[in-house]
Image (cartoon, rainbow, N blue to C red):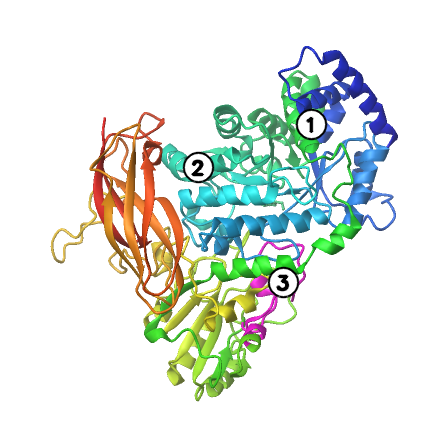
Amino acid sequence: MKNSIIWAAALFMTLSARAQTTSAMSDTDQKVDSLLSLMTLEEKIGQMNQYNGFWNVTGPAPQDGDAADKYEDLKQGRVGSMLNVRGVEEVRKVQKIAVEESRLGIPLIIGFDVIHGYKTVSPIPLAEAASWNLEAIERSAQVAAAEAAASGINWTFAPMVDISRDARWGRVMEGAGEDSYLGSQIARARVRGFQGSDLSDPLTVAACAKHFAAYGFAIAGKDYNTVDIGTATLYNEILPPFQAAKEEGVRTFMNAFNDLNGIPATGNTFLQRDILKGDWQFEGFVVSDWGSINEMIPHGYARDGKDAAYKAVTAGSDMDMESYHYLNHLPALVKEGKVDEALIDDAVRRILKVKFELGLFDDPYRYCDPEREKEVIGSEEHQQAVLDMAKKSIVLLKNENKLLPLKKEGLDIALIGPLAADKTSPLGSWRIAADDETAISVLEGLQQYADNELTHEQGVKLVEGQPSFTMETRINTTDRTGIEEAVAMARDKDVVIMVLGEHGFQSGEGRSRTSLDLPGLQQELLEAVYEVNKNIVLVLMNGRPLAIEWADENIPAIVEAWHLGTQSGNAIAQVLYGDHNPNGKLPMTFPKSVGQVPIYYNYKNTGRPEIPAPDLVFWSHYIDESNEPLYPFGYGLSYTDFEYSNLKTSGATMARDGALNVTATLTNSGDVAGTETVQLYIRDLTGSRTRPVKELKKFSQHMLQPGESVTVSFELTEEDLKFYTANNTWEAEAGDFKVFVGGSSDKLLETEFTLSE
Ligand code: NOJ
């Protein structure tokens, strides 16, 4: 620790000298400034450099090659952060080099993609969003943070708060769906869960709102593709969840791979300096995405590495993830007077501040306690939390003749599908720290919760032997040998449960699809089984909305079970057997066919919304597909029935400084207890810019016993009516509004009110 002592002493002297003049500065700011004053230009730039884990630290230090260079960089204070180093032992070793072998001993911040759990895996974020349950989502992020922090990590690259309306984009699994209001509430919950109330608590981590901005609007849903959108979409749809995360205190942002209207997000001054650090006064730091500073060269925006470093730092990217251009080019750029050292100081201040807040200067090994690591990871409490989250994430899409829930005894059940016994797919994409084969499969779950006869066949075989992190699908596209056996087995069964969908790595980064059908031979399998037994419960496992129109028309019961994480099979079994009454609601529209995509509930009316006369084609529609989705945003059934009545407002007019109370009666008219998510939408009928046909503004959840009613009440204020107007400001415009309340975006009671001048 000798070097830390040197700067600590200097720090104390500087602090004492300044004590009286800097009372307005926070204690942390003063410490940061004192440390900064001791740093050489190279050391400052080092803080802005992030390396991937580069050698097996349990072995001897690397002697040559790239790893040896990086090891030396660590000793020379040329590395501020590392990612993908995990486990107390590994983290301690890299931290030790930074703290004990570098001149100033500045600790590293250790980043990792803790997206939906660490070892104990939660449902994928899109699935969690289907719960609309902010407490459960916060708890899930808390569990993920605790396990990651116990493993030496102190910074997660989550939450991804990108709004997306395109199910072809593989990363929809990582977000909260298509709606900006729901996305904002969930962004806040996740930031609270990861960061807690004290960043220095060794069971919390710094969060990172990503990808700033508009990554989810890649043209044609193709990952990393160009984004070309108007400012109204940017402000109204894309930015709100980022701003919500900022307001919730998120400590870092990550920029994005895409270009936005011609300027790569990583080199985008408008996004990072004007909006984020300017308008929003964000005081944390911005990390680039992996190599995204370098990617400005192929984008055609930077000439070479030096130009890329110049453009990124000027635009407000504070830390370079794996491009090395800051390390290699910023010293010269400053010495040549092209980059003002004040920009470097600003970036380094931001980075050091987060390190101070994490408590790394008090104890650089505070996240490295091997006892805590053993105790926290995989604890029973965490298993229960992810099970609870998984149950709440399930959406019942169809349940004809109350086929579900199933009886717990006396049934002879066929369980069919490539994913039925799979213990890896349910973990989903982005769960790097979890081990393969650690999820409870549906087969295992069903065996636990009932005494029925259960026979299992894959039907379509999973391709064996491929590494799971591959571009290829593991769901067979050619081998039909299992289909006949499955059909024969299903013929005489009381019920067939079919577990179909996407393999765990068929969604996620780089996994864009042009089809939203059931992959491989699964549709063929489904239809073949249906020929012999129509009593089918289809359990879907997938990371994005699928186009399952045939199934919706023919299969009596459909359960959307996403990729639900470690406790997947238990959650699904509890729902199928009625131990848990499902209450999830879709956070993203399911299309009838891929050609409808992007399809979303808050579309604009257009000038030709309706058929003008029978057989006339000149209106906004397709000639070969309806405009309706298969399942709309906000949709989801229950084992009970809910009825809505009595929608009222407290007045016909809302004053600008006043509020409007909106009430409706919700009744459980079915015969079991259940929870309903009540949704409130508005429509601004005329605006200085055209407004969507519906916009979600509020929601709340209510658990009701059979026959029970409750008056659900929401308060609307001027704030809820604001949007990015033609004046390019965020304001509410006087005029007429509709307000809707109900249990799905397509089935709502409605009334009106007026916002006065
Ligand atoms: C690239 C991804 O876009 C980003 O979300 C992730 O955090 C980084 N890689 C680091 O793994």
Q: Name the residue carrying label 3.
A: 468
Q: Is residue 451 above or below residue 60?
A: below
- Residue stretch rendered in magenta on the structure: 420-446
> Badge 1: how crowded within 10 Å, few (<14), some, or many (20+)?
some
- Sequence-first tag of 2 and 1: 2
Instruction: Tell me: 743 left or right of 449.
Output: left
Ligand 1's image quarter is: top right
| The C terminus - image quarter | top left
Q: Give the secondary structure at mark 3.
A: loop
| The N terminus - image quarter | top right
Instruction: Tell me: 310 left or right of 356.
Output: left
> Badge 2: how crowded within 10 Å, few (<14), some, or many (20+)?
many
Q: Give the secondary structure at mark 2.
A: helix
Q: Quadrant of residue 670?
A: bottom left
Q: Name the residue carrying label 2.
A: 240
Q: Is residue 137 above or below residue 323?
A: below
Q: What is the spatial separation of the Cα atoms under label 2 and label 1, in whole angstroms?
A: 35 Å
* Percent x, y of residue 158: 58, 44
Residue found at x 54% / y 77%: 458
Q: Is residue 443 magenta?
A: yes
Residue in front for this viewpoint, 520 or 83: 83
* Ligand 1 is within 8 Å of the C-beta of the residue at disc 3: no
Residue type pointed to by label 3: Ser
Q: Is residue 428 visible?
A: no
Q: Is residue 171 visible?
A: yes
- Sequence-first tag of 1 and 3: 1
Residue found at x 32% / y 25%: 727
Residue type pointed to by label 2: Pro
